[in-house]
Amino acid sequence: MQKPTSTSSPDEGRPGPGGASPGDQLSGTGEVCGTDQPGGGPPGAGGKIPMAALLTLILGAFMAILDGSIVNVALPRMMAIFGSTADQIQWVLTGYMLASGVVIPVTGYLSDRFGGKKVYIISLGAFTFGSALCALAWSNNSLVVARVIQAIGGGMMMPVSMAMIYYIVPRDKIGMALGIWGISAMVAPSIGPTLGGYLVDNFSWQWIFTINIPIGIAAVFLSMAILKETPLKTGLKADFPGIILSIAGCFALLLALSEGQDKGWTSLYIVNLFIFSGFTLALFVIWELITDHPMLDIRLLKNITFAASLVCISIATIGLFSAIFLVPLFVQNVQGLTPMQTGMMMAPAAMASGIMMPISGRLFDKIGALPLCVVGLTITIITTYQLHAITYDISYRDLQLLLVERALGLGLCMMPLTTAGMNTIPHFLIGRASALGNTVRQISASFGIAYLTYVMLHRQEYHAARLADSVNWSSPAATGVMQQLQGLLSQAGYSPQGATGILSALVMRESLISGIADAFVVSTVIIAIAMPFVFFLSKKRVETQRAKEYRRYAHLAPPGGPPGGPPGRGGPGSGRPGIPAGSPDPVKA
């Protein structure tokens, strides 16, 4: 197996594009599983997807995402056992979200410095150890600490596993591979409440953590046996100012988004968090642009295709979580479904998106992202808007069918939105790009839930006031309903005075339904904003942009041309980095 080695450059000693110096070369210490070189075989080479390695990476990513949603249904039980208040128990969720969010930006540097396999195994170990501590927790504070340890491992697994896929899978099969990998991102949030409800109802709350222990141990041993180390980079120095600024900025931003609704968006506490995060993240961007060894290469955003991909995936993430967040609120608070029944209702949608992800990946490898994204986003926009027409009388099956149709659209477009941008990144920068993309995804998910919650509650107040004005003694309809309720209560042996409370509850129920409906309208508009950006993701644009990026970072490429370069992976005799001899230059074309 030929290993990448460091090479010299005419620009030796000067920082290259993105602030990386030519000293940040790939060393000869890493091997890659599944292919002769990172990035796999060239398009049309007929390379196979190493399924054992891919499934090992999926296992960790699935557990990390699943644990973000499986805990929700157990919170009431934990409150009763630990004697916690609602604010205290909320930190079981908030702590996990904050810890996983702040470690994501660092994973690119860690993978380049120590190797993707090593970082992945350590993150699996931390996640499994944290799960064991969660199951042994004796108080609310001990559970929060254990969740933070669990989240450190879980937060690193997503970007590291995505980056490793680009090293182990041939470039012409990357769409199919990421489609399979993407099942974890689409299905885990949907089945989490169902699985959590089942475990809590039939066993105990500890089982939602205990179940991770044998799976995590098995995943560690599988990773050690199946995965091979990714190439390392020599000459890297830790960007401590960048690490501190990113952790502080992301922590303040995510904390503000998670607590804004409870504390008040205009409260001094939340406003100060936003000011601090904005100032800190601005300093982080400036520092990353001037340092020779940036933790995150902000100049990757000069890549228009990659930037458009991040915008689209951020918006699509908000669309994904709008249904995952709003529909359970509707069916549980309005229709009275249990968490288990809610999970069973949403399970077919999760299955539909899981089935569609590999299909969209296979199609992506053949026709590119643009047609899939246009069709998928169109379906998502239409079905999300249809959800605004939900009423108290909507049937279980009708709502379930609508969610399945929506999931098919999301499953068709989510993977191409991500992969189109990542395919333009040189393979030796995939770790940094994956960390940047997952950071944006985490922040957009938190922002989407926070903003949609604000819209729902604000519109609920508006509709409650409007309905209360119309329900008075001068309204013949309201008077008639009141008399009917009083008569029914008298016949049942209850006091007629209870009719006022029942009518008030009906007003609040209808205002909640209207608030949720308005939130779906806003979600529809947000998803529609992504449509213009998908036209930057056509197959021709992706190939052209890939060629530009390989030339921009040519000084970092391993000898013989960078593996995975456009339209093949390059090699001896390549006229340009990443372009085999005799192939047309897509940039000039």
Image (cartoon, grey):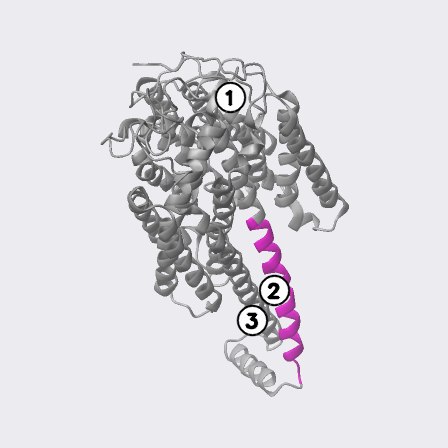
Q: What type is the residue that disc 3 sits on?
A: Leu
Tell me the chief SS of the magenta region. helix
User: Was residue 449 drawn as part of the magenta stretch in this picture?
Assistant: yes
Question: How many numbered discs sit on the rendered protein?
Answer: 3
User: Was residue 222 drawn as part of the magenta stretch in this picture?
Assistant: no
Q: Is tag 1's residue or tag 2's residue first in the polypeptide sequence? A: 1
Name, please, the residue furthest toward the right.
268
Which structural element holds mark 3? helix
- Viewer-side label of 3, 2: 2
- Viewer-side label of 1, 2: 1
Q: Are marks 3 and 2 in contact (CB under 8 Å)?
A: no
Q: CA distance from mark 1 to mark 2?
A: 46 Å
Taking the image as shown, residue 272 lies to the left or right of residue 179, namely right
The boundaries of the magenta stretch are 448-473
Mark 1 closeness class: few <14, some 14–19, many ≥20 residues within 10 Å: many
Residue in the foreground of this view, choosing between 189 and 410: 410
Question: Is residue 383 visible from the viewing direction of this image?
Answer: yes
Quadrant containing the C terminus is top left
Name the mark on residue 506.
Answer: 3
Mark 2 closeness class: few <14, some 14–19, many ≥20 residues within 10 Å: many
Q: Is tag 3's residue or tag 1's residue first in the polypeptide sequence? A: 1
Q: Residue at x 44, y 54 (%)?
A: 338
Residue in the foreground of this view, choosing between 173 and 125: 173
Q: CA distance from mark 3 to mark 2?
A: 13 Å
Q: Is tag 3's residue or tag 2's residue first in the polypeptide sequence? A: 2
Taking the image as shown, residue 102 lies to the left or right of residue 113, namely right
Q: CA distance from mark 3 to mark 1?
A: 55 Å
Q: What type is the residue that disc 2 sits on?
A: Gln
Name the mark on residue 110.
Answer: 1
Residue of label 2: 460
